[in-house]
Image (cartoon, rainbow, N blue to C red):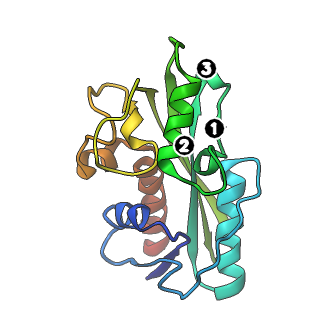
Amino acid sequence: MKLVFATHNENKFNEVKELLPEYIELLSLTDLDCHEDIPETAETLEGNAKIKADYVTKNYGLPCFADDTGLLVDALNGAPGAYSARYAGEQKNASDNMTKLLSELKGIENRSARFQTSIVLNLNKESIFFQGIVEGKITAYETGEQGFGYDPIFQPKGYQKTFGELPLKIKNQISHRGRAIQKLVAYLQQYRSN
């Protein structure tokens, strides 16, 4: 089964590919020769995921899914949320985003936060939504070289290490994206057996 994951992000693509069963041939936007930067203009993660999935469905006619992930920090009323990738500006620089976030949390005791991934699957003229959440907290400084985005400053609940330090195998089992993808896979297996 061919399935497009509407992303240009190689790290994210590889992370997701690890979680999918072998019968799914996963394609990225680059594989489709689509080099568009699909604008994420919605106010919500679900809305942004739907924009990307709909773009692929409309322009390529292939079954596809898209995700949008946000980091929601309690002390910042849920910010950066849907603006996580461009929190420090349109250049979408992870280091700048982390620097801005850490500076805004300076001196703040409540550092609880959660990562949320929303996925939209477009299959057979239907849109199906999936969600994954992982609770944790923002650390005082960056630790670890693994992962991407805010991983070096996010410590998942129950762990002493950040996502930037945890091996991919463990991260995939407990992460927001991992949980959302598990729901997507369960749906696809059920769909396949019908």
Residue name at image x 64 percent, y 78 percent: 36
In space, the residues marked 2 and 3 are separated at their CA atoms by 16 Å
Find residue 169 and report its horizontal and vertical position in percent.
24, 51
Q: Is residue 36 left or right of residue 4?
A: right
Residue at disc 1, secondary structure: strand
Q: Which residue is mark 3?
A: 75
Q: Residues within 10 Å of mark 1 (few under 14, many from 20)?
A: some
Point out the tag, 2 or 3, that comes first from the N-terminus: 3
Q: Image check: 170 left or right of 78?
A: left
Measure the C-alpha gap from mark 2 to mark 1: 9 Å
Q: Which mark is residue 97?
A: 2
User: How many residues crowd mark 2 within 10 Å: few (<14), some (14–19), many (20+)?
Assistant: many
Figure quadrant of residue 176: top left
Residue type, label 2:
Asn
In this rendering, does residue 27 appear at all? Answer: yes
| Residue at x 28% of width, y 41% of height | 144
* Location of mark 1 (residue): 80
Mark closest to the chain's N terminus, 2 or 1: 1
Task: Choose the circle earlier in sequence order: 3 or 1.
Answer: 3
Q: Are marks 2 and 1 in contact (CB under 8 Å)?
A: yes
- Cα–Cα gap, marks 3 and 1: 11 Å
In the displayed structure, does residue 10 sit left or right of residue 145?
Answer: right
Which label sits on residue 70?
Answer: none
- The residue at the point 30 percent across, 75 percent down is 22
